[in-house]
Amino acid sequence: MPYVEGFGTWPFGEEWLWEATAAVYLPLLERLERAEAPVTVGVTPVLADQLETMRDGDSGERFLRFLREVRTAVHEEDERGLRDTGFGDLAYEVGRAAGDYSRADAAFEARRRDLIGAFAALEGVELWTSAATHALLPLVATEQGLALQLGTGTRSHERRFSHFDGGFWLPECAYVPGLERDLADRGVRAFCVDQTGGPAAEQLQPVATEAGPTAVPIDWATIELVWNERSGYPVHPTYRDYHRRTTHDLRPWNNGGEPYEPERARALAREHARDFVDRVRQRVAGGGLLCCALDTELLGHWWYEGLDWLSAVLEEASARGLELVTVGEGLERVKPVRRELHASSWGRGKDLSTWDSPQVAELAFSARRAELSLLAATADGAGHDSLARAARELLALQSSDWAFLVTRDLAADYPLRRARGHEAGVREALAHSRSDPGLHNLAPDLDLASFCAP
């Protein structure tokens, strides 16, 4: 999730945040509270920046207007249109789905709009942080720029959740040898890596690094049971079709082209949870720590039934003899091995080309130019306010999501417009411009001192 609060509405802009909050974060909190299961959840600082404004700022009111006015209106209009044209089954499903948003409204108000506090209060859940704006760390140009991303990310986590236990999600799992030294400097004790290609047993072995932090391989043998657009659970004909939509972007069909039946889909999610647990049990029969890492928005947004599946996995694991632990607990139980780690990511090709290729050259060079300009300004003695605003514009520019959206052609020219705007913002700030940056709560715990250090 890049910083979208205050930057546009439909189809690309802050409605991305509103939709994710309604369809993913609020129901995820409810499921985790109910399950009280040992789960590791990464809360990226840039997401937390935006959730925080929903409690204290105008964005919470805009979120409620989105639920009460926008989503209510489009569901009513499409339900009426489908019914009037003879598609009663589809109309019924649209009306039912409207309840997702009214429940989100009630849950948001019941939590006093404080999702950060709700995550902090979860029992048994291990919270991880990440880089300040989910920047691809191997592509950050300077040591100071890396320190800015890492320092701001860990500081914000400590302030919001009162402590930092050392769990750090590498954005896009992007790793290069030596990065662990910078992580160790910020108190990181564990991070995930994608080391696909080695022996299968190695995916279950944490790796001790000389710098101190432990690298935990993610296990694609189990991740792909869920996260595979051709053969994963979500493509089953019974599940809701994410791609086929009504006039106002609603989804009353299943993948098989028939009217969606939620009860059948929920029952199937339970079956798939049992299958998943049984396969994981077989995978770890010889011992080891299996880490199945998923983008949170896969559950509830891209895969509508994903949260039903997750809840069932947490229930079925205990019933079927599979022990669940947080990453931190697992590292206390499974001794790390020593071996070399290779540069990798979980992007296409398992390399950095999603974020560093001719298709996204403008974005890569733009971020590098801005970072070097800011570094030069610190040497020239620019004022604190000017540097702070420029640093926040740089952080927004460095988000890995912009290049991902371009390479996957998911958001038209929105990511390029945003990147160009933030690079211009760096220039304006360093020229002592007084224009409003529009970054209402991006990086309130900015660690500018780490960038300015010699």
Image (tube, helix red, strand yellow):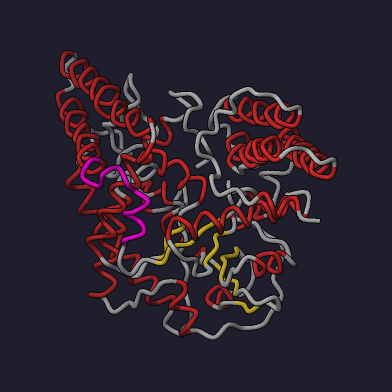
**Left or right: where does residue 40 sit relative to residue 353?**
left
Assign the C terminus to one quadrant of the image.
bottom right
Residue 75: x %, y % from top left: 24, 24
At 78% from the left and 51% from the top, the residue drawn is 142
**In the depicted view, which residue is nearer to us: 165 or 96?**
165
Residue 25: x %, y % from top left: 35, 47
* Above-or-below relation of 416 to 100: above
**Left or right: where does residue 409 sit relative to residue 306?**
right
Quadrant for residue 80, please give it. Answer: top left
**In the depicted view, which residue is nearer to us: 41 or 303?**
41
**Which segment did they paint magenta?**
109-121
Tally of marks: 0
Residue 393: x %, y % from top left: 64, 35
**In the depicted view, which residue is nearer to us: 286 or 5?**
5
At 58% from the left and 46% from the top, the residue drawn is 133
At 30% from the left and 64% from the top, the residue drawn is 313
At 55% from the left and 45% from the top, the residue drawn is 443
**In the depicted view, which residue is nearer to us: 223 or 21?**
21
Reply yes or no: does residue 113 show up in magenta: yes
Reply yes or no: does residue 302 show up in magenta: no
Residue 64: x %, y % from top left: 29, 30
Of helix, strand and loop, which mostly describes the magenta segment? Answer: helix
